[in-house]
Every structure is written in structure tokens, then in C-alpha cells.
């Protein structure tokens, strides 16, 4: 996974470095949270 996440073009309008960094950390936290979620029940259902 690259260090720099792709930023949508409309997000570039915001030039406040603190706000940009806050959004970047929020996105990273979302990605990490997705990896920690338990596997879905469907993965363990017998067919």
C-alpha cells in the first residue's frame, strides 16, 4: 500500500495543511478499522 493515498480532485481546493492532514489520518484510520473487522458470516457458511 502506498504511503500517499489518492486525493480526489475536489479535495485539493482546501489549502489548509492541518485540515488536509486531519482527513488523511481519518482515511488511514478507516482502512485500519476495515482490516480489524471480523470476517463476515457468509465466509463460514456451508454451501
Image (cartoon, rainbow, N blue to C red):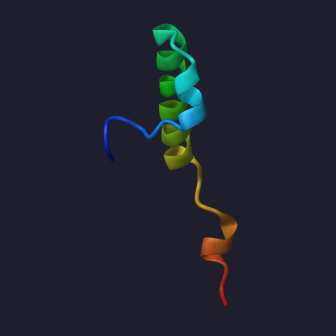
Residue at 58%, 48% in the rendered image? 37
Q: Please state which of residues 35 and 15 is positioned toward the viewer in this rendering.
A: 15
**Residue 23 % position (x, y):** 55, 23
Is 29 above or below relative to 39? above
**Is residue 26 in view?**
no
Residue shown at 52% from the left, 9% from the top:
16
Q: Quadrant of residue 3?
A: top left
**Is 14 displayed left or right of 47 in the figure?**
left
Instruction: Please indicate, yes or no, whether residue 24 appears anywhere in the rendered image.
Output: yes
Task: Provide residue 46's location: percent of width, then percent of height.
Answer: 65, 86
Which residue is painted at 52% across and 31% down in the image? Answer: 29
Can you say whether 39 is above or below 19 in the image? below
Asked whether 14 or 31 is in front, the reply is: 14
Q: Position of residue 44 (x, y in %)?
A: 61, 74
Which quadrant of the structure image shows residue 13? top right
Does 28 sit left or right of 4 as displayed?
right
Residue extending farthest to the bottom is 47
Residue 41 lies, in percent from the top left, at 68, 67
Residue 36 sits above or below residue 3 on the image = below
Query: Where is 12 relative to 34, above or below?
Result: above
Residue displayed at 33% across by 47% down: 1
**Which one is in front, 42 or 11?**
11
| Quarter containing the C terminus | bottom right
Amino acid at each position: 500500500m502506498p504511503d500517499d493515498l489518492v486525493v480526489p480532485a475536489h479535495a485539493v481546493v482546501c489549502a489548509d495543511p492541518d485540515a488536509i492532514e486531519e482527513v488523511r489520518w481519518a482515511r488511514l484510520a478507516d482502512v485500519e478499522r476495515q482490516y480489524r473487522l471480523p470476517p463476515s458470516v457468509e465466509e463460514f457458511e456451508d454451501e
